[in-house]
Image: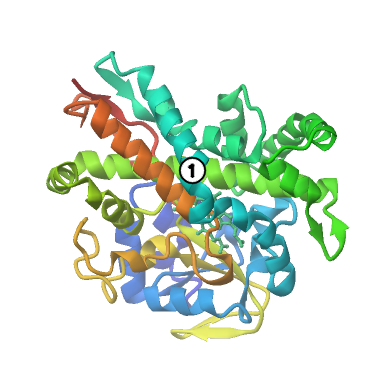
Amino acid sequence: MSQDTDPSYDFNRLFGGSIMSPVPPPYEVFARLRAEKPVLRMKGWMENSHLVTRYDDVIAGLKDSATFSARGNARGIGIVIGRTILEMEGAEHLRHRRILTPFFSPGALRGNVAKYVEATSHELIDRFAADGRANLVPQFTFTYPLRVMAWIIGVPISDFEAFHHWALALVSVADDPVKAFAAARSIVDYLRPILEERRAEPREDLLTALLNAEVEGERLSEEEVLSFLRLLLPAGAETTYRLTGNVLFALLTHPEARAEVEANPELLPAFIEETLRWDSAVQLISREVMRDVELHGHRIPKGDLASFAIGSANRDERHYEDPDRFDLHRANKGDHVSFGLGEHFCLGSHLARLEARIAVAAMLERLPELRLDPAEACSIRGFAFRSPDRLPVLFG
Ligand code: HEM
């Protein structure tokens, strides 16, 4: 039977048919695929995509940008956010990425950004600290990174709920394109007057930097600035809300590792790194295949997409010992691919780590005996993106 017709490897059956919907953890299926079918043809919206699940193949693919081009991103989220650095390559990519880098370097994050992140964490915790219980997703993780991102960019957002729903709709384009396009329009309607204001009154924020930036002697067009913003807002809000949720979930379900972190807060960054490896907020990276490729006997024709399953790579038993186990002291936890690899390595990785670290430290400090509410179920869910959709907790 051919690799594409064998029903036991039918993508829809294996993963529930949707790349966004909450399916059972994909890790058992990933393990089976790594062993039996390390490259699997996907179906449905991702019809011409091939899922690559082994660590070494994911690393090699992401390093080989001549064969696996980031222009593949144009066929995913690029459809709704427009042309951004995500899909650019070579010199063009570098020139555009350079506009953003100064705002996200570890040095830039130290002073005011770290202070703002800390203040925001405490402000949100203040709202429920006296209640003895909370659902940390709607009450904390959902809007926390969006507040930070909006502050860095310099957009005054009053309705964080609406904005976050737009960000979610954008990244869910695979499942609901109509909603995604509507969200992209809403974001533009919201931002356009702010752009006008900032042109008239420049400030020291990212928005002013985008409006003043020159690439090859030319200012960015309004459409280019809007595309940057449509990338940054969901990139900073959607993903980091999931990362923070995953770190909290890991902390509340691994009492021994948590006790170590509480006894020695210096271990918190290591805890976050192992969470990134153990359950990554972002699970897939798409690339367009620039020539016919043959991998483990599976042919990927030129023009199709390779979908690198970073969550699977992070659990590859060929690379990590006992990969399903959360191990705070795992020596090689830092070589996960949760932030991608190569030219397109996540620009916000330092900020995302900073936000997760400050949020978790603030919660441990402010909410004594923080624990999951045993009366309410919760788990990390999803396929393309993963995080808990609720975190009901008790404390004090
Ligand atoms: C403050 C938060 C964040 C910001 C501002 C941010 C921003 C970005 C930007 C601008 C890019 C495109 C870089 C390029 O193409 O040159 C990117 C790539 C990426 N980001 Fe983030 N990000 C954030 C958080 C996260 C988190 C929490 C994760 C996952 C745990 C993540 C995973 C990725 C991945 C996997 C890529 C590579 C995509 C590719 O190669 O196609 N990001 N990020």
Q: Residue at x 49, y 37 (%)?
A: 145
- Give percent across and percent down for residue 51: 48, 68
The residue furthest top is: 131
Viewer-nearest residue: 236 or 304: 236
Could you tell me which secondary element the residue under label 1 belongs to? helix
The residue furthest front is: 111
Viewer-nearest residue: 33 or 241: 241
Q: From this viewpoint, is residue 20 visible? A: no
> The N terminus lies in which quarter of the figure?
bottom left
Label 1 crowding class (10 Å Cα cut-off): few <14, some 14-19, many 20+? Answer: few
Left or right: 235 as drawn, with respect to 231: left
Task: Tell me if residue 308 comes above or below residue 115 in the rendering.
Answer: below
Q: Residue at x 52, y 78 (%)?
A: 63
- Give percent across and percent down for residue 119: 43, 29
Q: From this viewpoint, is residue 263 visible? A: yes
- Give percent across and percent down for residue 196: 83, 33
Q: Looking at numbered disc 1 in the image, what kind of residue is underneath it?
A: Gly
- Give percent across and percent down for residue 339: 47, 60
Establish whether ligand 1 lies closer than 8 Å to the Cβ of label 1: no
Q: Residue at x 61, y 57 (%)?
A: 101
Viewer-nearest residue: 211 or 11: 211
Viewer-nearest residue: 344 or 41: 344
Tell me where residue 166 sits by quadrant. top right
- The residue where tag 1 is placed is 111
**Scheme of image coloration:** rainbow
Task: Tell me if residue 299 comes above or below residue 48 in the rendering.
Answer: below
Left or right: 267 as drawn, with respect to 72: left
